[in-house]
Amino acid sequence: MKFFVDTADVAAIAELNDLGMVDGVTTNPSLIKKSGRDILEVTKEICALVEGPVSAEVVATEAEQMIAEGRKLAEIADNIAVKVPLTWDGLKACKVLSDEGKMVNVTLCFSANQALLAAKAGATFISPFIGRLDDINLDGMQLIEDIRTVYDNYGFETEILAASIRTANHVAESARIGADVITAPPSVIKSLAMHPLTDKGLDAFLKDIADAGIKIL
């Protein structure tokens, strides 16, 4: 499974990238706003930092303007994935941009039918939002499983990019089901290393080390 980092915080990306934990980056207008930086400037810096796809989202809602913005964003670097919403206009933009050889991430997916349309339109990635479905008492993980089944049934090459990930369990379940990619905030990725039994075991080891006066260097 590939790990994308869902942030526009360059320092946080760099820290995880140094550990080999970054296969790509996803951004959106809210994350760009949080960074307080110009979208083109910060996106260019991120693209230079990581080798994998960097999703940069259009801000238009009509197809022709989305296409123009997507072409502009794609000029930033070769590893840009143009991010468009899963609307009819977004699908039109996806088809044009993907036919031009650009990576396209279709976002805000909440149903298997939407994911099917995105694959037919040539999407590189489909981004189903797990956490937002959980927020309204629907099963976000079931959507990942449904999309996996549909795509496998017909051999679609669009990669399932599990998004809106809130917990370590979301990551584990996405991996179990067979999502191709997860994108999560740095805090969630770091939380994958945490377990209370690890902490308990380390505390016991440290006590024994102190009691025995063990030193290596």
Image (cartoon, helix red, strand yellow):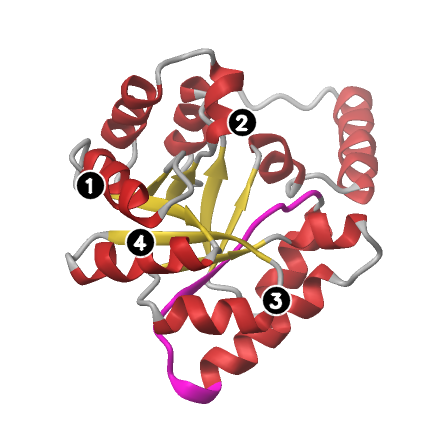
Q: Position of residue 19 (x, y in %)?
A: 42, 34
Question: Which comes before the other along the chain, label 2 or label 3?
Answer: 2
**Residue holding disc 2:** 30
Whether residue 52 is visible: no
Disc nearest the viewer among 4 and 3 = 4
**x and y percentages locating residue 198 in the rendered image:** 75, 41
Q: Residue at x 25, y 25 (%)?
A: 44
How many residues crowd around disc 1 within 10 Å: few (fewer than 14), some, or many (20 or more)?
some
Q: Residues within 10 Å of mark 3 (few under 14, many from 20)?
A: some
Please name the residue that numbered disc 3 is placed on. Answer: 111
| Tag 1–tag 4 contact (CB < 8 Å) | no
Query: Quarter-wise, where is residue 126 in the image?
Result: bottom left
- Asked if residue 151 is positioned above or below residue 36 in the image, the reply reads below
In this orientation, does residue 32 appear?
A: yes
**Marks 2/3: CA–CA distance:** 23 Å
Q: CA distance from mark 3 to mark 1?
A: 28 Å
Instruction: Indicate whether residue 30 is drawn in magenta.
Output: no
Q: Amino acid at mark 2?
A: Ser
Q: Under tag 3, what secondary structure?
A: loop
Q: Which residues are magenta?
A: 153-166
